[in-house]
Structures are given as C-alpha cells and as structure tokens.
Amino acid sequence: MLGWEDQPILNGGVGKACFHLAEALAKQVELTMMVPQADHWALDQHAEVVGLDALNLAEVKQAPIPQTYERFATTHRVPAALFPYEDAIQAFESFQEEESLETSDTAFPAGSAPEAAQTAAADHPVGQPQINVAPTTRGTLNYEVIQFSRYVARLASHKEFDVVYAHDWMTFLAGMEIKIQRKVPLVIHVHSLSFDRQVGEPLGWIYELEARAMREADLILAVSDRTARMIVKRYGVSAKKVQVVYNGSDKITASPVTPAKRKQVTFLGRMVAQKGPLQFLRVAKQVLKQDPEVHFILAGHGPQLDEAKLLARRLGIDEAVTFTGFLPPEKAEALLKNSTVFLLPAISEPFGLAAIEATQAGLPVVITYQTGAAEVLPQASVADSNDTAGLANLVVQLLQDKDLRQNQVEANQQAVKQLTWGTSADQIMESLHTVLQTQE
C-alpha cells in the first residue's frame, strides 16, 4: 500500500483516510506500507501555524494520537517530501521551463538525486509508463514525486506481494512502475482529481499522470459517486473499471445535539479554493443581513488564508469573523461542539470528511451539491455552490429552528453509523479479491 504521508495530521483528509484504511485492512491481510518521510527542513517550510491558538510547530509535527503504521503493518518510510497542496503551480511552471530529457532508470542510491522528473507521454508503448523528464531542484513537487516512485520501486523489488494499492496521484507513478516491474495488478484509490484541486483547470503534468494511471490500473476506487462520474467523463475510463468506496469514520459514539450558547457558524478545513472559504465569507455577509448576532469561525490554514482575511475586511464583516489558523484534532472537535451550524460551501469536494466529523459532533451541516458527503448525509441542507443567497437561507433556518437542527443531526448520525473504516476495508478487500481472480 502506497500512502500519502507519515503523519496524518499535516495534509488533512487523505492522510487520515490512508491511515485508517491501512489499519482496517491490516486485520485481514499481510500489509506493507510505504509512505513519504519529510525531513525537518521540509516540515518547517510547510507546517505554517497561524491564528489565535498558541500552537507550536512541534505540536503540528506530531500525529494527533499515537498513530504509527508500525502498530499494524510493515512500514518503509521513503525520503521524499510530498506536500500535495503546496507549490503545485510553481512545480508545474518549473517543469515547463526545464529542458526535456529521457531516462529509464528506476532506482538510485540513498541520498542521490534522480536525474529528472516525469510526465506521461502518449506515444510510448502501452503498458510502459513513459516519462518526459526535466531536471529540477530538490523540494519541487515533480522532483519529490520521482524521488518517491524510484525509492519505492527499489524497495518493492525485494518483496513478495500480490497487489499494489496506491492512494491518489502522488503515488500513482510508483504504483505503475511496481506493476510493470513485479507484474502484479494495480489498484488506485482516487481521493481527489486535478479537476477538484484546480477547480476545473487541471495542471497539465499532474492531469496526464492521473490519466495514465487510470489507463494502467486494473481497478479504480473512488470516494464518491460524484468522483466516479468525473473519472468516467473527464478521463475516458470505462464505468465498469470504477467502484465507489465511501470514506469511513474513526469515531464510535456520536455526540448529542446541545443547546446553542451562541449563534456560531463554522468552517473547518484547508483554506483552498475547492473547499470554498471565500464563498463562506460571502454567505456570512448574507446571513448577517438577516441576523447580525451570528459569529463565524474559519479554522484551518492554506494558500487562501490571507485572501480570506482581506475579503472579510472588504465585505465589512471582519468583526464577526474569527480565523483560528490550524487546529489539532482535539481543539477542532471542541470547536465543532461549541458551534451551532457547520457550513462547507465547497466548489468541488470529492467527499468532505469534515462534514462527517461535524455531524458526529452534533452539528447540522450546510453543504453543496458539489460535495460528495451529500450522498451519505440524507438530511443535510444542500444548495449549489454558487447560490450564495440559498446557502445563507439554509444557515438562517437552522440557526432559528431548534427542532430542525435536532431532526437533521439525528437522521444524519443514524446514516453515519454505517460509515466505518471497517466497512470500507471490507469493500476494498472484496474488490482486491476480484482483481486477483481475473489475473489468474
């Protein structure tokens, strides 16, 4: 299994999903995990801490609980600093500017740099992931993807296994190389697409890598029906090759709905375009016109944080808005329990674990039709991501109607009981068995 990160706290939902799926799968199979290991310099560069909480960097670098893959799986940490949400545009521009070269080397000594970064080439023989390569400096995204894939391929050459299971685009290249090298089936798990992260305008080399991996994969797992449909439509993949496996939940007991001490609407997640933090503020403006007593919390960090703060001032609502910056899990949970409504006005969200976490914390949720979690929360309040007034009206209704809040939360919590990582792992195991049977 090729995972995203050594410490599931740094990159949000995908890191959590990889960890909990691995933990559940390890109860049924002999599992080997290969994850990137960032050095301290890389962590210092990427783990930005801002906001009201006096949170130190050491706390950010620690896993939220004693979560280490060694507890349940053979684990190899690969020296590659993969930070999927940082510097993607810069990496792409660097890739465009460099002179293209070619390489067929798949492994190199520890500490040495790969000669090039790779991207899929359409004219290469089918079944062989061809890469047009460009030399670049350590720390750029294309370098680190190659760093990871080559080390992983070398590690895999000394192991016996039945299937390679890769999570999201940063591990896809490694998965393809292992498939060819060891002649085992490749299963890829899509947690998000370039069309999500770049809001409909995918960066070329990342999109090409995704497209190549989907062609090479024996099976594609998607986190929602919405994502599955996008894979079929945007990447030309047969629907028969794609299966939906919803994310699970790591919380056993949901919290009851508690009386609201104040009217507080909360956003929790990365401050990136796809999750809609700027739309959150526009909705807040509309809500405040109807109820000036409401307070709004944006918890999280990311590239749109400064822009969001500026927009709050431009809208004249900065006194009604608090930016907390990054919050560790226990503080994030406390924030949700002290809120009245959870609002995620996402523009393109494949699933949205935060909406599930908010539901379990006893909160009604307002989400968009562009959010995968709408498929599993039957009583969520839903509107189009561009319908600012509609989203605001849904928030106001929940703030004003205690019974509506109670009924929504209870219905959604009942539905969420079916979403466990164990259930997800069972579905994945069934799919893996099917793939292996077709290879016989």
Image: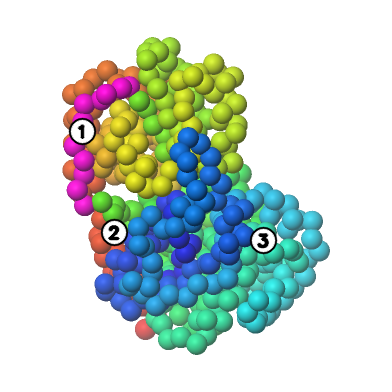
Say which of 60 and 308 sits in front: 60
Side of 328 relative to 364 (left or right): right
* SS at circle 1: loop
**Neighbourhood count class around disc 1 (C-alpha, 10 Å): few under 14, some 14–19, many 20 upward:** many
Q: Residue 122: give x, y in percent of width and height.
A: 66, 65
Marked residue nearer the N-terminal end (3 or 1): 3
Residue 254, magenta (yes or no):
yes
Q: Which residue is mark 1?
A: 257
Looking at the rendered image, the quarter that the N terminus falls into is: bottom left
Q: Quadrant of residue 135?
A: bottom right
**Image: magenta residue range:** 252-263
Say which of 278 and 45 sits in front: 45
Residue type at mark 1 is: Val
Marked residue nearer the N-terminal end (2 or 3): 3
Do callouts 2 and 3 mark residues in contact (Cβ within 8 Å)?
A: no
Say which of 200 and 341 sits in front: 341
Inspect this view and state whether residue 21 appears.
yes
Residue type at mark 3 is: Gly
Side of 195 relative to 227 (left or right): right
* Dominant secondary structure of the residues highlighted in magenta in the image: loop
Q: Determine which of the numbered discs, if any, sits on residue 421 in the image.
A: 2
Q: Determine which of the numbered discs, if any, sits on residue 139 in the image.
A: 3
Looking at the rendered image, the quarter that the C terminus falls into is: bottom left
Side of 275 relative to 248 (left or right): right
For the residues carrying marks 2 and 1, which lies nearer the camera in this image? 1
Colour scheme in use: rainbow
